[in-house]
Amino acid sequence: MQYPIEYVSQSFNLARTFKRYWSVNFKWVPCEALPSGQETLLRDCEGLFTSKIFGIGLLTATACCWVLFACKCGAGGQETGEKREEAFLWTAIRGNKPFTNTQIVTVMLLSNFIGVAFSRSLHFQFYVWYFHSLPFLLWCTRFPDIVKILMFVLVEMCWNPWEGETSTISSSMLLTGLHALLLVGLFEGLRVAHPKEGAPALKED
């Protein structure tokens, strides 16, 4: 890899600013518009949205969610007669049993979704990062099918312009709420450590 230090440092550059006008997910976060002439290519307001503490908070929330779901995948186990089966994550890491195809897909799509949910500013083109995974993730939850379909439709609506060429505070609040609801549904629904009780997505192939 060329310029590895520069790549890593810029990937986690918390001083980088973002233009709130194009934000689809966190436009509801307070930020006062800059006077005309003071706007830059990547900054059009001053406030919590552009603050370093907000960026650090989102990065911390991302890491915490990854840890929580990793613990969900690794905690406990399943009693089968006299033998106790370990959760699939730790079993696979120790080399006792390989990941199944379904488990690999689930972990990858879930990890990606967590990163998307806590991104400071998602622009319209970033929908391609995870739209294809939404049906799979929704069906990993225990929500009624009608709720899953409704959530999918509402997410799609949020990713279309509501006012002129961009989103609104209302649409961004709705999208943030849908992301949070899906995360809660996944955490409750992915009984990774207990396949008999869990969602079909994590059963053995």
Image: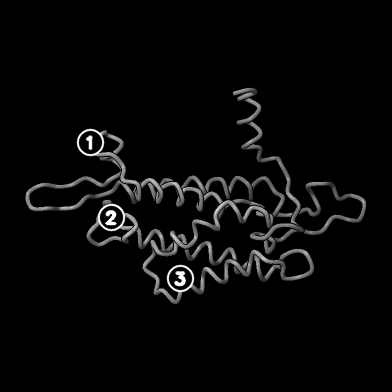
Q: Residue at x 66, y 27 (%)?
A: 6
Disc 3, SS = helix
At a point 44% along the width and 46% down the height, the residue shown is 108
* Residue type (three-letter) at the residue carrying disc 3: Lys
In-front residue for pair 75/191: 191
Which numbered disc, 1 or 3, marks the residue that appears first in the sequence? 1
Which residue is label 2 attached to? 203
Badge 3 or badge 2: first in the primary sequence: 3
- Separation (CA) of disc 3 from disc 2: 20 Å
Mark 3 closeness class: few <14, some 14–19, many ≥20 residues within 10 Å: many
Can residue 94 be seen here? The reply is yes
Q: Nearer the viewer, residue 61 or 146?
A: 146
- Residue tagged by mark 1? 96
What residue did someone put label 3 on?
A: 148
Tell which circle, 2 or 1, labels the residue nearer the N-terminal end.
Answer: 1
65 sits to left or right of 122: left
Farthest bottom residue? 146
- Residue type at numbered disc 1: Asn
- In percent of width and height, residue 197 lies at 25, 62
